[in-house]
Amino acid sequence: MRGPVVVGVDGSPSSMAAVEVAAHEARLRGVGLRLVHAFGRPVAHIPPGGRPWEPSDAGMHELIDGTLTKAERRAHDTGPGVEITREVVVGEPVTVLEIESRTASLAVVGSRGLSRFGALLLGSTAGHLAAHAACPVLVVRRRPHPAGPVLLAVDGSPEARGAVEFAFAHASLHGVGLVALHAWSIRTERAYESPADPPFVTYDEGRLHDEEERVLAEALGGLRDRYPDVAVDRRLVRDRVRHSLIEASADAGLVVVGARGRGGFAGLLLGSVSQAVLHHAQCPVAVVRPGHE
């Protein structure tokens, strides 16, 4: 999709960092940048007979305009030449950005916006958008390491194919390497030949290791030929998935995960691994839902 990169702007330091990342992404992709500020207030605070939305009340128009002007200036400095549009939209941020994502190639948000819940590791807007957006979502947790590789979480599930393709394309675009990490343990479903409880079933560790090697190789199949410029570091580790990804993120420029991988509950829009990485990764995180690469 050649749609713009959309970024949510609320004036917080986290959203301003997201603006810089979004401007850089738009410049590399050769698309426009759309700065979006969602303006809303709880219905309970509307005075009797008053209009539910009025951005001009109490100087809000000037405040919002100043916030967007600052964001636009930051975007111009980071992505010179990028066509920038700005929009103030009436509505809750989670709803507005979800709608904006339908015509975007990428949605970018800060990990935490303006909120009285300052101790939260992940804001509600970022978490909701990662689960519901119609395009890949990049959550800016910390400043990206410009030379850090893309860290891809590989689980071999069909649902994660879009994440693999996004990771290769992103690494090629940024001129960095790709670390394809596949974590396994004796608790993986591939270790067992029967439905009995794992502690009471024997397994062949060598066979299991070979099977996980095959899963990793097949997950990357074809894409290494399509992106010959991307140096791939294949890592097969025996560890907990969440722990290994969070630890490896310390040296990465971006972590890419699927929304819900192998073993997830069908009703969940975000799996436990993607949620854990969104909360604890030491670099920005991209969540790619099936079909949204």
Image: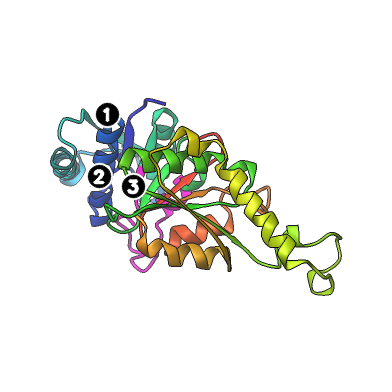
10 Å neighbourhood of mark 2: few (<14), some, or many (≥20)?
A: many
Specify whether 145 is left or right of 219: left
Report the residue marked by disc 3.
Answer: 176
Give me the C-alpha separation between circle 3 and circle 1.
23 Å
Count the marks: how many?
3
- Residue interval drawn in magenta: 108-129
Relative to 114, say whether 225 is above or below. Answer: above
Residue appearing at x 28%, y 35% in the figure: 28
Report the residue marked by disc 2.
Answer: 19
In the picture, residue 188 is in which quadrant?
bottom right
* In this view, the mark in front (3 or 1): 3
The residue nearer to you, when weighing 37 against 83, is 83
Give me the C-alpha separation between circle 1 and circle 2.
13 Å
Residue 28: within the magenta? no
Report the residue marked by disc 1.
Answer: 32
10 Å neighbourhood of mark 3: few (<14), some, or many (≥20)?
A: many
Q: Earlier in the sequence, mark 2 or mark 3?
A: 2
The residue nearer to you, when weighing 270 against 46, is 270
Residue appearing at x 74%, y 57% in the figure: 190
Q: Residue 219 at what x, y percent from top left?
A: 59, 44
Specify whether 262 is left or right of 129: right
Query: Element at badge 3?
Result: loop
Amino acid type at mark 3: Val
Give me the C-alpha separation between circle 2 and circle 3.
21 Å
